[in-house]
Image (cartoon, helix red, strand yellow):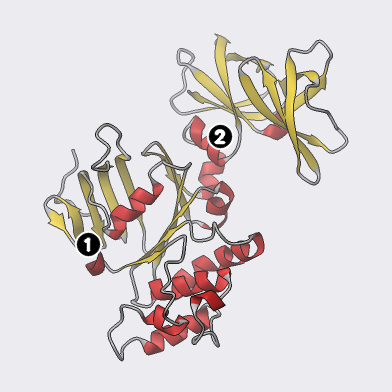
Amino acid sequence: MFNKFVLSTGSTVALNGVWHRYSNSAEAWTLRGVDLEVAPGELVGLLGPSGCGKTTLLRLIAGFERPERGSLQLGQQLVAGGGAWLAPERRGVGMVFQDYALFPHLNAWRNARFGLARGKGDERVAWLFSLLGLEGLEQRYPHQLSGGQRQRLAMARALAPSPRVVLLDEPFSSLDVEVRLRLRSELSAVLEACDASGVIVTHDPDEALAICDRVAVMRDGVLHQCATPQEIVRTPATPFVGSFVLQRNVIPAQSTRPDHWRCSLGDLNDQDIRMGPTTTSEEHCCVLVESKDIEIVIDDRGAASIVSREFLGDLWEYRVRVGELIVRATCAVDRDYSPRTSCNIRVKSGATIDLMAS
């Protein structure tokens, strides 16, 4: 059990053994035993599919929900758990919502100042308008701003009270591609300029890996891995991390004899197999294989069949059915195969694959 009196040192946010479920859900836990820390100045991404508990975790940090078990601290202060509770408005946390949540009847300047004491904070708001490229827009109302400008204004409002941590709930999902890429590339620099840590919710693996110092990968309320983008790419902790974050194929595998493995695509004797730390020959195992390492061989009597394909500019990505399994394979554009084409597929010789317990 967690010790409710032991506070983490040197963290902006620390969750210790947090469990949570909503009052109208008697059976399903939204979060199950989550441990997570955010270091000063760090941007941590909460990544996972819809319903995995990302936004719930954000709401717990903000104080909009109370954990049923476990504890939460901000800096050296215990704010939830162990009999402690600190109201949201006293936590020093800024919040940026997906839908901006701006006040339509207030101009940009008054939106950014909302919640600040009268006559205080004008210099900081002016600095934030300069930092975020909002100069000259102070008198415009939200409906007179573009989507990118509204999101920048939401950031300015969240940062105006000088919070120690800013929470961002899928802040770029409703923006067009060009604006989204530009704003997300600026986020770390903005947080650094404001001396704030950040926690950002996203369901986009590319976004999380591109901008976050560490990424916390979640599924069904469980934290599967929290690591740097480089560590996640090199050593995914679970098959789910490999499939959801890295988009690798997860293929069941069996040991045929010591140090020899076989999967539904054939023997795995000519590949570079990286063993997971807990994998043994007695376990149910799987291999993680990149789509570029799957080879398609057209064969009228083949055991596999092409289900669909997507054009990626310089590649085709095929979805191929073999038995009950759907496998993704990428090929050069001159390998132009139609759906329903019969084929065989195999793992390319020399490919590096990860073997782990399933």
Earlier residue among tags 2 and 1: 1
Pointer 1: what residue? 76
Instruction: Write down the quadrant of residue 120 in the picture.
Output: bottom left
**Residue 128 shown left or right of residue 206 in the figure:** left
The residue under the point 41% across, 62% down is 198
Q: Residue at x 79, y 18 (%)?
A: 343
Camera-side residue of 75 and 304: 304
* Rendered position, 38 above or below 310: below
**Label disc, if present, on residue 243 of the rendered structure:** 2
Q: Secondary structure at mark 1?
A: loop
Foreground residue, 125 or 245? 125
Residue positioned most to the right: 334
Q: Nearer the viewer, mark 2 or mark 1?
A: 2
- Direction bottom: furthest residue: 119
Task: Residue 348: tell me if it is visible.
Answer: no
- Quick one: quadrant of the N terminus? top left
In depth, the one of 278 and 336 nearer the eye is 336
- Viewer-closest of 230 and 89: 89
Can you give x and y, in whole percent of width and height, for residue 142 in the image? 50, 76
Q: Amino acid at mark 2?
A: Ser
| 326 is higher (above) or lower (below) than 66 | above
Whether residue 238 is visible, yes or no, is yes
Tell me what residue is drawn at x 49 percent, y 82 percent: 129
Q: Position of residue 241 (x, y in %)?
A: 50, 37
Query: At label 1, which amino acid type do we have?
Result: Gln
